Amino acid sequence: MYRLTGVTKRYTRGKETVEALRGIDLTIEDGDQLAIQGPTGGGKSTLLQMIGGLDRPSEGSVELDGVDLARISEAKLTRMRAEKIGIIFQSFNLIPTLTAQENVETALVPLGVKPAERRERAAEALRSVGLGERLSHAPSELSGGQQQRVAIARALVKKPKVLLADEPTGNLDEGTRDDIMGLLEGLWHEYGLTFIMVTHDSSIAKKAPRLATIKAGLITLTEQGAGQAYPRQRQQQPYAEQGTQGYGDQGYGVQGY
Amino acid sequence: MFGIYLKRELGRRKKAALVIALGLALGIALVITVNSVSAGMTQAQDKVLQSLYGLGTDMTVTKARTAPTGNSSGQPRFEFDAKSNDDDTEQSSDRVMTQGGQALKSSLVTKVADQKGVAAAVGALTLNVTKVDGSFTQGKAQSSTGGSGSDQGGPGGGQGSGSTAAPQVQGGGASFDVNSYSVAGVDVTNQDLGPLAGSKITSGKTFTSAQTNAKVAVVSKSYAKENSYKVGKTFKVSGTKYKIIGIATPESSESTTDVYLPLKQAQTLADAKNQVTTIYVKATDSKQIDSVKATIQKNISGTTVTTSADLAETVSGSLSTASNLATSVGKWLSIAVLAAAFLVAALLTSSAVSRRVREFGTLKALGWPSRRVTRQVVGESMVNGLLGGALGIALGLAAAYTVTAISPTLTAEMGSTGGGGGMGGGPGGGGGPGQQSASNTMEIALSAPVSVTTIALAVGLAVAGGLIAGAMGGWRASRMRPADALRSVS
């Protein structure tokens, strides 16, 4: 469970100080899905960075399962990211020189997983997102949607507690966007992840059970109703059998993943 | 993952990797070349110094020659009687002169040996023998009744002129060869130091310690070849017959002494009983040479102590110029190129890291600790450095090999060893007896030996280059925050 209390983040540029977040209070229960929306420069990505332990607040605390990410050492914070937090980026952020499988393996490297097991788990994760035939492909040989699926496999291969996504469909066309969102929704249900996503896309944002709108560093929470778009009962079903209501059915097999 | 990632990254940035490696290679190749050429210069200088000193000598003790007094010019004088034209008998005369400075008493050798810091001291007498042999015939007096010409007689004759019936001297003259060679009187009881120390006996044998006054000689290879001397043959010096027992080949390229005799024999020939011209000194510690020099000069007045460093200063010519070039220009050039290469490598690595902000930020966001990211950057740099090192070593070896193959000839001119000179001797035969020429010239082929130390230095520099560049890049990478991965959009 996340508990953010009075989170403030200031950036100093020369003599000017900008407050990106102003005393944010937010609680996110395990298994929740939260969409964060807001205008450009409103502070939504900054909030995601605080939640993901990618940056520390100037004031306030960010507790994940009782551990304050703002106060722990850099080494512990790094370990926390390695073990509990999976992140998906708008630009996919794949290492261009590594194959799809090797890219997924990078998430297991800091956990000290042995190479053979690493390869096996990475291959399995890629198969689960429908890229079983693309293990040895370089990112440049994959489409945008396929690259984002590699990034999703990389985020989930370590079986994290939290999945963070920063504009996961921002660089994709509409069709591919639905594929990816369908996949993420399915995985969220399947694994009971805490899924926090920054998005510009209102059609995506309004399907999330909870919506946080950030404007000028201040947050407004809207409860949109759990299960509105993705009924909870589907969580127990294999993703391949679920279909993806609202996002198109891609039928990605997640069995065994 | 480390190896795969490293290999792929270097493969992706081939051009940048090549630029870094080439820069380092150039610097390292220069260091190897300058080092090896410098070593070659040192060897060449050592050869020159050895030819003057003999191997193992740290310094020499001599005494400056005083100006000749009275009518004596100090030069040899030859007297031959002219013979009749019918007499073809050749006349021969040797003049033996001590070479270099004023003679020192043999007892000084022991005194020098007793000085603090002196390991051994050996006396030697350097002589110059000028041999004149040929025929000198008288002119003939003839009566003449006419003629208007003038006939010139030889040195033994005179000059006739005029048309009177007075007898004229005709014919007569001289035909002679002058042969000059150097002789060194060697202390046969200690041949590890002194004139013979720099030579190897390549035929026959050297003196035994019992041959302190034996009529035996060792001749240099070049002198033996010039005169067709072989072991077992005899030759005369100033009327005394000596048997050749060995042929000596100098370790250095030049022979400075033609004939080696037992010291007592040399003293007898030069009428210099219990005298030496040079005392060869070996110090107990090569680092204490200057203090030993000062001690000797203080305790034994009137002598000149010359160390190899002093002697090296008297060497001029292209060897000196090239040596100065190698040690000054070469050294600074290689340092400058190396520093530039290090800087370029560091900047390129740092710039490459800057271009990979998103990549490293992503890895950190995935939970890669800073040290792992740094290790990756340093690893890539190290491979670049080692690649540059290997390339540099290959280039440096090729350059050193080329220098050795071409073997450019350098000349070394040794400073004045004339009457007032401080050096005992000098390469023999440089000038006439008594007054030696102002300088003696040696030609030395330059080589560029590459030592294991030089290769080790090159490897060290390659590693250092890689580490410096890697440290700079790694430092930047380690300071990168995972949030940068989210901010940076390419």
Image (cartoon, rainbow, N blue to C red):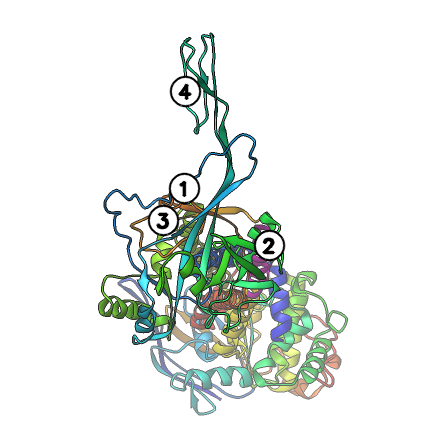
Q: Amino acid at mark 4?
A: Gln
Q: Which mark is residue B415?
A: 3
Against B424, residue A114 (above or below) is below
Against B330, residue A205 (above or below) is below
Disc 1 marks which residue? Answer: B78
Q: How far apart are the alpha carbons under marks 4 and 1?
A: 23 Å
Comparing marks 4 and 3, which lies closer to the viewer?
A: 4
Q: Are marks 4 and 2 in one subunit?
A: yes
Comparing marks 3 and 1, which lies closer to the viewer?
A: 1
Comparing marks 4 and 1, which lies closer to the viewer?
A: 4
Q: Nearer the viewer, residue B256 or B274?
A: B274
Q: Measured from the top left, where is residue B404 in percent x and y?
A: 58, 53
Q: Measured from the top left, where is residue B59 in percent x and y?
A: 36, 64
Q: Residue at 44% across / 78% down in the picture?
A: A221
Q: Is residue B228 left or right of residue B97?
A: right
Q: Nearer the viewer, residue B489 or B163?
A: B163
